[in-house]
Image: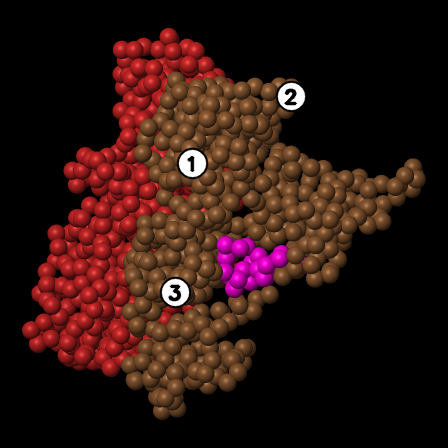
Chain colours: A red, B brown
Amino acid sequence: MKIIIVGGVAGGASCAARLRRLDEKAEIIMVERGPYVSYANCGLPYHVGGSIPKESSLLVATEQTFRDSFAIDCRTRCEVVGISSKDKTVQLKNHVTGALTTEKYDKLVLSPGAAPIRPPLPGIDLPGIFSVRTVPDARSIREWLDRGAADCSGMNSYTGFQTVNKPKRAVVVGGGFIGLEMVENFVERGLEVTLIERLNQVMPPLDPEMARLVERYMVKHGVKLELNDGVAGFKQSADGSLEVLTASGKKHAADIVILAIGVKPETELAKMAGIELGQRGGIRVDDHMRTSNPDIFAVGDAIEVKDFVTGQWTLIPLAGPANRQGRIAADVICGRDSRYRGTQGTSICKIFEGTIASTGASEKVLIQTGDKDFEKIYLYPNSHAGYYPGAKMLAIKVLFRKSDGRLLGAQVMGEDGVAKRIDSFAMAIQARLTIYDLEEAELSYAPPYGSAKDPVNFAGMVAVDIIRGDMPICHWNSVNGGFLLDVRNPSELAVESVDGAVNIPLPQLRARLSELPHDREILIICRSAQRAYYATRILLQNGFKARNISGGMLARSHRAAT
Amino acid sequence: MKIIIVGGVAGGASCAARLRRLDEKAEIIMVERGPYVSYANCGLPYHVGGSIPKESSLLVATEQTFRDSFAIDCRTRCEVVGISSKDKTVQLKNHVTGALTTEKYDKLVLSPGAAPIRPPLPGIDLPGIFSVRTVPDARSIREWLDRGAADCSGMNSYTGFQTVNKPKRAVVVGGGFIGLEMVENFVERGLEVTLIERLNQVMPPLDPEMARLVERYMVKHGVKLELNDGVAGFKQSADGSLEVLTASGKKHAADIVILAIGVKPETELAKMAGIELGQRGGIRVDDHMRTSNPDIFAVGDAIEVKDFVTGQWTLIPLAGPANRQGRIAADVICGRDSRYRGTQGTSICKIFEGTIASTGASEKVLIQTGDKDFEKIYLYPNSHAGYYPGAKMLAIKVLFRKSDGRLLGAQVMGEDGVAKRIDSFAMAIQARLTIYDLEEAELSYAPPYGSAKDPVNFAGMVAVDIIRGDMPICHWNSVNGGFLLDVRNPSELAVESVDGAVNIPLPQLRARLSELPHDREILIICRSAQRAYYATRILLQNGFKARNISGGMLARSHRAAT
């Protein structure tokens, strides 16, 4: 059996290594257009920033490793320039020698990845505008930033020649993962950074109100944030620096520009092979990673995947899924029945001292799919026992199905313990667990790591209270017409209060029920919605109509974060 | 309805608060023998060590809170001295006034906890010997340690009076959670610490070879570790300090001694009430937390629980389960069908810069229960992408069922990312997931937090390879008679090698197969068992009998850690 794998890195390289383990006799050729067959592209922003100083750290496995340890015919700087699916051949071009060769295959695996989107804007090819996808990209950015490092005067007084100023101002276009990681790493390098994002939020997998918290970290670190504005073009100024022009007519001066608008699946090869694409523009595969041609498989960022929660086709370019897809394609080629389960979109990102993470469906996505059978909650627990040093507040949003309690999605932001919680939620979604299961989850607790009631348990408890009817809730964006009751202590109100809310501190509530109306719905406020929950129970059992405002004052200030 | 809850803290206080939320009209009395109704006993060692400086930080909720916010008749320093389950009454003694009163109940909830074991050894009541269970215990220990703080000379030369030396030498008896936390906190305070443990390992929920890693941290921090030795008695020396005598005849000088031998369920009240106890000495309850008397419930450290994995009755005194049991008892008393699912024993502990955690069944427990349908693996992945700063090696042991792949237990030790992994394993055990599910789990990955193949995925992959027959393994303790093949590079062997092993580096293996015997089983060695896995695949497919030694050289040095 002869297998040709097009494209290395996560999906292709995993597939190749797995194929060899399963079939010692197969002929395996892996071709990669670029100079490196397996590198850590997730580390590129940190190499630019300097926390990963050596480029060689990013090289996971070399051509030599693939040849020696896996007996794989590994060819870098080699591109597939033609596919005949009828003859089962590919035409290869060696970019070093220019030679063209034709290879037959029994099975072909496409792992071409996704390319940075580069809209045809005026000036987009000016020097100083970069994407961040490959090791050579990172090298070019570093070289650009290091220009003029030795002489920052602009004019070298001794020689009389004009030298280049060391870049000081960066504009990052696009607020997704790569964009935010580049922002952080530019700030670490001491640059002034502007982030331009066409949407009303950064970090598209999040819902906008959770993105507010991410934005807050950027503002805190001096980043100029330009939301709701797209890039219209680029110009070179008289001094050689760049100007970024936006749709709203603004101009942002820049010594370096990063384009991180997103990626689109590389489908040239798929088109050559005549295989089916999906509506989202990616290669369509079944759960065996097989394309519409039974001898051609595809994996990684180039394919469409089924969203694990909504069941819809989507594009989710992530390294973990690409790795698993590569393994599954290898298994299937070797006659095994491995199947891909779909992608949850579990992701995490460091934002200065903060961490933001999400898994499963967002509210946005649920609304887009027309789903009305869901509820959401906000909670703000400590990352670990409050009495142990270093506890930080987490902001958590959880989405669940009203009819059966199934967990649909979670978003977590904070400075401690975020990864621990998002992985618990991710595992729960994978196992199709419900909020009832979250309530009973037995997670690790000691004062430095958690609480006897972990934030994940707490999310389950709050959600179950809602679904069982023990705690009707509402959200700040639907607070109108209700009677607002604030059950905090007067000292807390002195700091921040809500216009028109009546204050009865919780300990006085039972004695002052006569002050409350029976003919209006009472919407109850406290700091984090815990005391308001107790108050809701008191009122409901005394015949009032009452709702807890989810997340309390913390959810209110959270929404207004930037 | 009138409910009396005996004992506050985790189980009782959770039950009381939940009862009030569910039933605004119920009469609820909560009595607590000690001075505090709800305090963070998990924080006590850290209060002694000083990282939680204020005692008041440990007080979670006061009597006043329970009265004002929950309308609960909360009585501290009040002890139940008699129960008549026939009359449904309890006799209460007020320890302040000495008054005895009798209260009727409709439902009684017992939450008396577990008491530190205090064997009747000679000298056990000498001053300077402490347990660590309550806020007053911690206060006494702090006061004892602060004695003589102002004058360390032993003899006050001005007054001529002998003063007390500031304690310098601590002996901790018992290497469980409390024992280890006390060791760490004494070291933090600058004391010389000796830990005496009767068993051959610290941290009983772990298997002994994983405990070796914990022990290594203690030795590293200068703790004198005395395993396999029990305490035989205590003596006071002429200078007023203590001497701890052991079963093996050793003597350890001490200025303070902590007894942390374990706890036993408080069952005095249960005996008074005539309710059933289990074989392990705890109160027997059903999954509604109901005792053998339908009007009496019991929760927390005093009860026996079903081990979630083995299904056997056991004693697992942990705060998280106690909290959930309290809620469930309240639910059931209020007519709801909540059920306790059993306890997994998920636990975690900080050991200096390290963290040790476990969930589910250990190998010891599986062997005890006569289970032979399990396999174990060891792996040593990085806590996050190795190219990003701060990655640390994790040591992971995973136990799973051979016949169906169900995950049975996991133990994780390391200095980074331990809580994230143990919670993923814990959630997977709760959901009865298999190693196939671990392989497919979609966990959070970005370079600072994980790897594209998370350690949890990696554990799944290794286990699945075994169960599918792709990778036969063996363990270091069963390596005998096989042909040992080391596939590392010669430079690695120069550092550490295995006697009698033949070295063929992986890249040369395919060309040197003729050097290997066909009539013997070949046991393959590398650093972490990854290259040995590749070698195993090559040999198996070439007709050899081959096994990978699980965990490789890392597992070998790990076993020999202390």
Is residue A508 in sight in this rendering?
yes
Residues at discs 2 and 1 in contact (Cβ within 8 Å): no
Q: Name the residue rendered at 41%, 47% in the picture.
A: B306
Mark 2 and mark 1: Cα distance apart in space: 30 Å
Along the polypeptide, which appears first: circle 2 or circle 3? Answer: 2
Q: Name the residue rendered at 64%, 42% in the picture.
A: B131
Look at the image and say whether residue B472 sits in the magenta stretch.
no
Is residue A532 in sight in this rendering?
no
**In which chain is the residue bearing label 3?**
B
Residue under pointer 3 = B372
Mark drawn on residue B12 = none
- Residue B515 image position (x, y, % from top left): 39, 91
Magenta stretch, residue numbers: B197-224
Mark 3 and mark 1: Cα distance apart in space: 33 Å
Residues at discs 3 and 1 in contact (Cβ within 8 Å): no
**In which chain is the residue bearing label 2?**
B
Identify the image quadrant of residue B136. top right
**In which chain is the residue bearing label 1?**
B
Is disc 2 in the same subunit as disc 1? yes
Asked if residue A379 lies left or right of residue B96, the reply is: left
Q: Of tags 3 and 1, which is closer to the observer?
A: 1
Mark drawn on residue B291 = 1
- Residue B406 image position (x, y, % from top left): 33, 58
Please, is residue A478 above or below residue A437 in the view? above
Residue placed most toward the observer, A464 or B114: B114
Q: Name the residue rendered at 29%, 34% in the picture.
A: A376
Q: Name the residue rendered at 41%, 29% in the picture.
A: B295
Mark drawn on residue B98 = 2
